Amino acid sequence: MTLAFDDLLRLPDFDDVRRYVPKYDQPGPRYTSYPTAPVWTEDFDESEFREALARARNRKLSLYIHIPFCERLCSFCACNKTITQDHAVGGPYLDGLEREAEMLASAIGGERRCVQLAVGGGTPTFLSPQELARMCRVVDSHFPPDANAERSVEVDPRVTSRAQLEVLSEHGFNRISLGVQDFAPRVQRAINRVQSREQTERITLDARALGYASVNFDLIYGLPFQTVASFGETLDQVIALRPDRIALYSYAHVTWIVKAQRGFEKKDLPSAERKLAIMLLASQRLGEAGYRFLGLDHFALPQDELCVAAASGDLRRNFNGYTIRAGVDLIALGASGISELADAYAQSVRAPEPWREQVMKGHLATLRGWRLTPDDVRRKWLIQRLMCQGEVSERAYANAFGEALTERIPDLRPRLAPFVEDGLLVPDGEDYRVTPLGRLFLRVIAMSFDAYLPEPDLERPMFSRTV
Ligand code: SF4
């Protein structure tokens, strides 16, 4: 039985939420990978990555291209980006991408059919229309697109033109994701990202007119000065524009990583309780507007492929969020890009110039990575299942791996017992299902399967808080 997502649109009782916030609001990973990035090591170098790529031979590929440049700094942002107004950096960066694509293609060898391409950043539309066209030609020449390939791009509506959308559309792009975050002027000023509703609407309408099949909005809750009422107004405007998908991310306050966040005063940030109240309001309003809830932080209209995949149990989660392409290797191009193969992760050098220097010298600029052990593969599967199907299934685990889950994790039941007691999970035969309350604390439940979690260090936390 797969998770009935509509069930999860039922809202948990806010008194229950309030009761469990102090217990479950703690530093914890987001589990876009397992093992999580802090576990990876620099011992995993270029030669290890090349070996892992060779093992990926003949598999269908998903590609990610990272364009790291942004004209202005949004002070909340934890992405890997380089702020510059000098657009001359685009050409040399594309030279690096071209060289890297050649090397990756030859390391993989064989047929390299690309079933999914995502371009993110930074700001991909920092590149001119001509540069975007060159990027597409480079990638297509080394990784021919599948006839039904899904091709998506992240855009900043403040710096995106119709000409850029046209070029991408001519090269098969059919999905677009707009950074929106929040429409409230006070919040926008606080995060240094002033973006009018008209700018967002213009790109949405242009994308639809050009035939993009799916429009996504990224929103963030937990930003300075957000209130339940102010976010309600943002939701009104979002729902009126009717994006096909909405990613509703929890703001990660990680001042030890993102210095610009130190400008936020603690008193201006919503409390954990208020954050959850905003999240619940969004779940309610989006549910009433016809959206279905998917896993941790995504909503989509019922006809969207993500909803169909969720219903059939084919939803997966990777660095780009939720995806329907199970069983494909994800290969990243560009500075800081993270590749996810069946049995390995590899991340490239973060800063654009050192990355470019290495690739121009003929090296894959591998910074760090990890070769998954059989135990990692099994725990990764468990965490995926929890995040995507909302369940811990002993039966499905036994079918997938030919061993009992309690052999792998002997204290499974005592570990999950507190979540059952608090109403985050309900037992269902040999399985456990996530409840509407439990979906607010999925990251905490997932931590039960993590064999690498360090002791919490309050002085220097490694992860953002789970609420
Ligand atoms: S939110 Fe987007 S545009 Fe703003 S700094 Fe981050 S990557 Fe750049």
Image (cartoon, grey):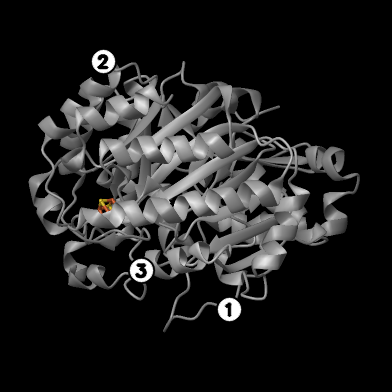
In the image, residue 33 sits, relative to residue 143, either above or below, namely: below
Question: Which callout, 2 or 3, points to the residue nearer the camera?
Answer: 2
Q: Which mark is residue 254?
A: 3
Residue at horizontal 80 percent and vertical 43 percent from the top: 397
In the rendered view, does 50 fall on the left or right side of 122? right
> Label 3 amino acid?
Val
Residue 65 at x, y = what percent? 46, 46
For this rendering, which residue is in front, 103 or 284? 103
Q: Quadrant of residue 14?
A: top left
**Residue 270 seen by the camera:** yes
In the rendered view, does 414 fall on the left or right side of 386? right
Badge 3 element: loop
Question: Which callout, 1 or 3, points to the residue nearer the camera?
Answer: 3
Whether the residue under disc 3 has CB within 8 Å of ligand 1:
no
Q: CA distance from mark 1 to mark 2?
A: 52 Å
Question: Which callout, 1 or 2, points to the residue nearer the camera?
Answer: 2
For the residues bearing labels 1 and 2, Cβ distance under 8 angstroms? no
Residue neighbourhood size for the residue with mark 3, other residues' Cα within 10 Å, grouped as few (<14), some (14–19), many (≥20) = some
> Label 2 amino acid?
Ala
> Label 1 amino acid?
Glu
**Residue 31 seen by the camera:** no
For this rendering, which residue is in front, 293 or 273? 293
Q: CA distance from mark 1 to mark 3?
A: 18 Å
Badge 2 element: helix
- The residue singled out by tag 2 in the image is 209
Residue furthest to the right: 402
- The residue singled out by tag 1 in the image is 455
Residue neighbourhood size for the residue with mark 2, other residues' Cα within 10 Å, grouped as few (<14), some (14–19), many (≥20) = few
Q: Earlier in the sequence, mark 2 or mark 3?
A: 2
